[in-house]
Amino acid sequence: MRMKSITGQEVHVALVETGHATRIGTDWTEVHPRFQMLAMSKGCVPEYYEPPSKQEEIDEVRKVESIQDLIIKAITKMKAEPLDGYFTQEGLPNLKKLSVVAGFEVKREQMIEAVSTMALAKE
């Protein structure tokens, strides 16, 4: 397979186990199969590689949700499938349980902001 470096400089690929080594420059170079995976991890691409368009990159960035959106989704999920201890006596989400459902540590301020946003959205 032919490959080239997209890092802007030549890439040196060496296999410690066998002692084999090769260099892949910015021009297309025939690369032995034993080097291909390591070469890709160091910034080389195969001949059939097509870089994503700028619009695809913009669309990918837009897919990233805000922390508040993720917290709101977690609270909504907790309300849809309530388990014992999910909510405090005041009706607020249990911070530790919310962090587990969200998949990251949620700070009290973030939780209160998300609950306020949800309350405003209902009005």
Image: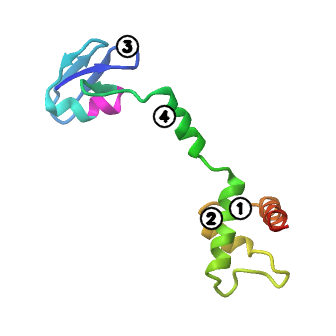
Give the quarter of the figure containing the C terminus.
bottom right
* Element type where label 2 sits in the image: helix
Q: Is residue 68 above or below residue 101?
A: above
Name the residue tied to disc 3. Answer: 9
Going by the numbered disc 3, the residue's amino acid type is Gln
In three-dimensional space, the C-alpha distance between marks 4 and 2, rounded to whole angstroms, equals: 27 Å
* Element type where label 3 sits in the image: loop
Q: Residue at x 61, y 69 (%)?
A: 101
Pointer 3 or 2: first along the chain: 3
Task: Please identify the quarter of the rendering in which residue 104 is found.
Answer: bottom right
Mark seen at residue 56: 4
Going by the numbered disc 2, the residue's amino acid type is Ala
User: Is residue 15 among what the camera can see?
Assistant: no
Q: Residue at x 52, y 40 (%)?
A: 60
User: Is residue 103 among what the camera can see?
Assistant: yes
Left or right, 122 with reference to 96: right
Query: Label 1 near label 2: C-beta < 8 Å?
Result: yes
**Magenta span of residues:** 38-43
- In the rendering, at what x and y percent does residue 61 appear? 57, 39
Between residues 72 and 22, which one lies in front from this camera angle? 72
- In the rendering, at what x and y percent does residue 67 appear? 68, 53
